[in-house]
Amino acid sequence: MMTKTTTSSALALTLAAVFASLLIASLEMLTRERASASKAAAELRYLGQVLDMDNQPAAFTFVSLPIDNRYLEVLGLGEAAQMHIALRNGEPYAAIVPSVSNTGYGGAIKLLVGIDFSARITAVRIVSHRETKGLGDKIESQQSDWIDSFKRRSLNNPKPSGWAIKADGGIYDQFTGATITPRAVVRQVAATLEVFAAARLTWLADSAPRESLDVEP
Amino acid sequence: MKTDSSRQHIFDGLWRNHPVLVQLLGLSPLLAVTTTLANALGLGVATLAVLIGSSITSSILRRHLSETLQLPILSLLIAAWVTAAELIVRAYAYPLSQELGVFLPLIACNCMLLDRAQNFAIRNTVCRATLDAVIVGSGFLSLMLVVGAIRELFGRGTLFADMYLIFGDIALNWVRRPFNGDYQMLIASMPAGGFLLIGFLIAIKNLIYNRRHRPIDVPKPGAKRVRTTGKII
Ligand SMILES: Cc1cc2nc3c(=O)[nH]c(=O)nc-3n(C[C@H](O)[C@H](O)[C@H](O)COP(=O)(O)O)c2cc1C
């Protein structure tokens, strides 16, 4: 009797394990292609949100480059990170740079900043933040169009003194009862533009098609 | 929790023995992700699918489960189905999988699944186990939808926002704003608001139920589980 139950439940455990492995392995194989396509589409949507794609997403491709260590601190990035170059019809069009402000009210505010190669901002989007709902969350594009006030701005437009919220003598609006959050975002966007100005030529060179490297040895 | 084979009891999961409203199972996903109808639909359907899968497989193996190996085997089956669901969601609704984040794999920890496997599926035929899973899972899903709709409506002033996470671009303009202008009631989107809402829904359910059924069900003293809002049948 004892051995019978033991064999029987050993059989059940084996069956369950085999079934579990088969189910997961076969589904993984069946969905692999679809999953990577979905992921690529999501990435395009994610990076595309800071680009003006004129409804031509197909014209854009992306090259990812590691960000040079010396820029990481200014960009608020703790560890090695990547930036992306958007190519339009194969030509470098804009840099898409992740950037984090640590001077917000509720902790890190993660930004995605798009800057075209004439050094103008294409768009800025908030990736994540923990600002207070109803106060600081107006930086989200779903909550208000404040974040669009960065569009087409550059380091010279406005002048450096204008790169601040109105309370600090700049040109950007603050929110009623919340000046810390927009101040943090404006500063970080300006800092990102400065990094772009310093790294622009390197990024351009690195994103250019390198035919010599593509040749098979 | 004895198994009653009479017909009338198999539908209990929808109302009289509702997994959340009576047994308070699966509260964590319920409170965490139901800030919008889209999230609630996504997680609710995934949970329903996993429940059906795990009930069927548990029932198939029911003659071979010894007391000692029952728990590991059932957990293994549930974990396998959850992983399967995660793979499918990631392939066909990638943005939803990003939005649900850790709560998708955490379905495995929803006690409702183990409860149905342990207390029903392994004591019943595959047919009945499937039916039970469909009913209990639908009870869970429909409550998720109610809570999600109410929280989205009051918390963000919208309905059907974010449906594109599941249905893709065709759903981009499904969003409805029933109120004029900007409308937000912050507490509705916060976990506290979710708790309050569940509390009210339980109260309403008990009100209706107790009106119809006298004498009132009172939990038996010394009952095995204490976190319940009525008698677990
Ligand atoms: C609970 C609480 C949450 C707050 N959240 C924010 C916030 O998310 N963003 C922000 O800029 N200010 C927030 N504030 C307000 C700031 O403390 C500060 O008063 C506000 O930015 C106005 O700054 P000012 O005095 O320079 O005008 C919050 C205040 C309280 C009491």
Image: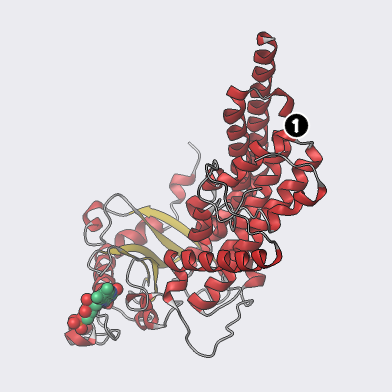
Kind of residue at badge 1? Ile
Residue A180 shows in this picture: no
Residue A94 percent location from the top left of the image: 41, 68
Q: Which residue sits at x=60%, y=62%?
A: B144
Q: Which residue sits at x=66%, y=64%?
A: B209
Q: Quadrant of the N terminus of chain B?
A: top right
Q: Residue furthest front?
A: B215
Q: In the depicted view, which residue is nearer to us: B59 or A77?
A: B59
Q: Secondary structure at mark 1?
A: helix
Q: Is residue B227 left or right of residue A161?
A: right
Q: Is residue A102 left or right of residue A151?
A: left
Q: Which residue sits at x=25%, y=72%?
A: A184
> Residue tagged by mark 1?
B60
Q: Which residue sits at x=26%, y=62%?
A: A75
Residue B30 percent location from the top left of the image: 53, 58
**Position above or below: A188 against A170:** above
Q: Is residue B109 left or right of residue A120?
A: right
Tell which subunit mark 1 falls on.
B
Q: Is residue B126 left or right of residue B159?
A: right
- Image quadrant of ligand 1 equals bottom left
* Colour approach in the figure: secondary structure
Q: Alpha-carbon neighbours of circle 1 within 10 Å: few (<14), some, or many (≥20)?
A: some
Q: In the depicted view, which residue is nearer to us: A197 or B65?
A: B65
Residue A155 percent location from the top left of the image: 25, 78
Q: Quadrant of residue B118?
A: top right
* Residue at disc 1, CB closer than 8 Å to ligand 1: no
